[in-house]
Image (spheres, rainbow, N blue to C red):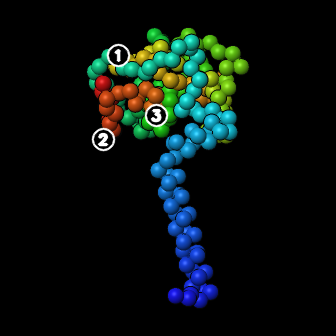
Amino acid sequence: MDLSSGAKTLLFQGLSWAAVAGLALVGFLNYEHLRSTAGAAFGAASVDTPVVLRSQPVATMPVSSGTVELKASGNGHFETRADVNGRSIPALVDTGASIVVLTYEDARRAGIHLQASDFTQPVATANGTSYVAPVTLDRVTIGNLTVRNVRAAVADQGRLKVTLLGMSFLSQLDRVDMRDGVMVLKN
């Protein structure tokens, strides 16, 4: 079967677009793996894999069980007080944050004292690239829920207004639901 040059061009373009769509689908389905692989290849650290400032690796695990219900504030955010390393600090529950991110001031309150040289991990923010200090928190507690050895980062001084309780804490719970302006945290 001999095709005209116009039909060949149309067939080639169709196959090209199908290949692009296939690659896009593979990229979408493997986004996390590709991102971590690319980060490692180019030497860029990822907020999802902070350097642990301990001599031995630690596992994140919940140590207490219970249920906590948080009501959304007037602006729709879920605000609470979290006990971080034994110190009570105001925090915003943020399911969009990969890890817990402490303000510089809250980190100091929690007994974490950092040097300028500790802020080594680049992170992309709405305001451009910033640097954080990766840490591991001994424990994070909200109400009667406690998680130990929580991956976290500390924002450079003045870069963050409120501590964010991200997925490195939330993913260790058995249940995180939002319904009718109430967030239920259960372990």
Horizontally, residue 160 falls left or right of residue 165, namely: right
Question: To which residue does mark 2 refer?
Answer: 180
At which x and y percent is residue 129? 67, 37
Q: Which residue is depicted at the point 47% across and 17% down?
A: 58
Query: Could you say whether the residue bearing mark 3 is in a helix, strand or loop?
Result: loop
Question: To which residue does mark 3 refer?
Answer: 94
Q: Is residue 143 visible?
A: no
Q: Is residue 167 visible?
A: yes
Task: Characterize the local packing of mark 1: few (<14), some (14-19) or many (20 or more) Cα atoms within 10 angstroms.
Answer: few
| Amino acid type indicated by mark 1 | Val
Q: Quadrant of residue 40?
A: top right
Question: To which residue does mark 1 refer?
Answer: 63
Earlier residue among tags 2 and 3: 3
Nearer the observer, disc 1 or disc 3? 1
In the picture as drawn, the residue positioned furthest to the left comes out as 66
Q: Which residue is depicted at the point 30% across and 41% down?
A: 180
Task: Characterize the local packing of mark 3: few (<14), some (14-19) or many (20 or more) Cα atoms within 10 angstroms.
Answer: some
Q: Is residue 148 above or below residue 40?
A: above
Q: Is residue 17 above or below residue 52?
A: below
Query: Could you say whether the residue bearing mark 2 is in a helix, strand or loop?
Result: loop
CA distance for labels 2 and 3: 17 Å
Contact? badges 1 and 3 (CB < 8 Å) = no
| Amino acid type indicated by mark 3 | Asp
Q: Which mark is residue 78?
A: none
At which x and y percent is residue 38? 62, 42
Nearer the observer, disc 2 or disc 3? 3
CA distance for labels 1 and 3: 21 Å
